[in-house]
Amino acid sequence: MPSPLNMNNKRQSEALPFIGDPSEIEKKSFEIIEGLIRGKGLAGPEKDVVMRVVHATADPEFAGLMLFSKGAVEAGLKALGKGCPIITDVKMLKAGISPNRAGGSENNFCFISDLDVATEARKTGSTRAVAAMRKASNRMDGAIIAIGNAPTALYEVMRLILEDGIRPALVVGVPVGFVGAAESKEALSKLKEVPFITNRGRKGGSPVGAAIINALIKLNTNE
């Protein structure tokens, strides 16, 4: 015979507003997001990207913070269609990117944990993020570069573009933090040489970077 305690627990659990169907959870989430960002002037594929960011962060403020250079989404889709490399600053961002695209996950690169990168950073007095971007530089032409953690990595990417003539297909620069994050994104927003997606202020991070890339992947595969 069930104890009164177990019966009370059962009644309480039955009263919880639980949705178990993943597709229904996603559908409901995007319905809520649609209402939260209404009136922000978003439309087309840029809106799809912003909605994915809001979904990943549960932060509707991103709807007013995201910045897209002209044709940035289209440039990202074109590159993905060609199976371009995706280069990330940290492993967390790399791990968050869906493998469901031309090129596959084996075409995603992150060098920050490589021993030679650590050695180079110590030798030059730079961060590992900077050394990792330098190691990746020979793969950057035509690639999508996603920076979610390290402002120094974003600054190095911009230096490579301006001084070495590297031409990525798209730079997704959304580092998070209190030192250099907002400033590096402000600098990216003024870059004319390559398409970019970024956001204003200190907010950002690997989940934001992954959400942007995954939104592009979904758009590219018409999911």
Image (cartoon, grey):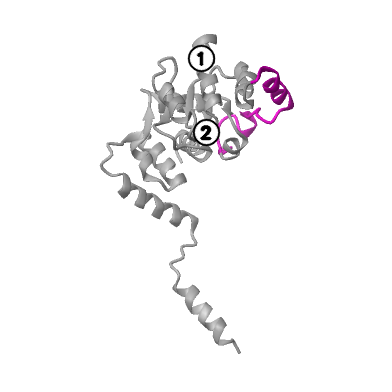
Q: Is residue 98 visible?
A: yes
- The answer to whether 124 is drawn above or below residue 61 in the figure is above
Q: CA distance from mark 1 to mark 2?
A: 18 Å
Name the residue at 53% across, 20% down.
Answer: 157
- SS of the residue under disc 1: helix
- The answer to whether 9 is drawn above or below residue 86 in the figure is below
Q: Which residue is mark 2?
A: 148
Q: Is residue 101 magenta?
A: yes
Q: What x and y, as percent, mark residue 143?
A: 54, 22
Q: Which residue is mark 1?
A: 161
Q: Earlier in the sequence, mark 1 or mark 2?
A: 2
Q: Work out which residue is located at the far left of the displayed protein and give it.
A: 39
User: Does residue 215 appear left or right of residue 123 in this picture?
Assistant: left
C-beta proximity under 8 Å, tags 1 and 2: no
- SS of the residue under disc 2: loop
Query: At label 2, which amino acid type do we have?
Result: Gly
Q: What x and y, as percent, mark residue 153?
A: 56, 25
Query: At label 1, which amino acid type do we have?
Result: Ile
Q: What x and y, as percent, mark residue 160?
A: 54, 15
Span colored in magenta = 97-125
- The answer to whether 24 is drawn above or below residue 75 in the figure is below
Q: Label 1: few (<14), some or many (≥20) within 10 Å? A: some
Q: How many marks?
A: 2
Q: Is residue 15 magenta?
A: no
Q: Is residue 167 visible?
A: no
Name the residue at 40% across, 16% down.
Answer: 192
Q: What x and y, as percent, mark residue 151?
A: 52, 27
Point out which mark residue 106 bears.
none
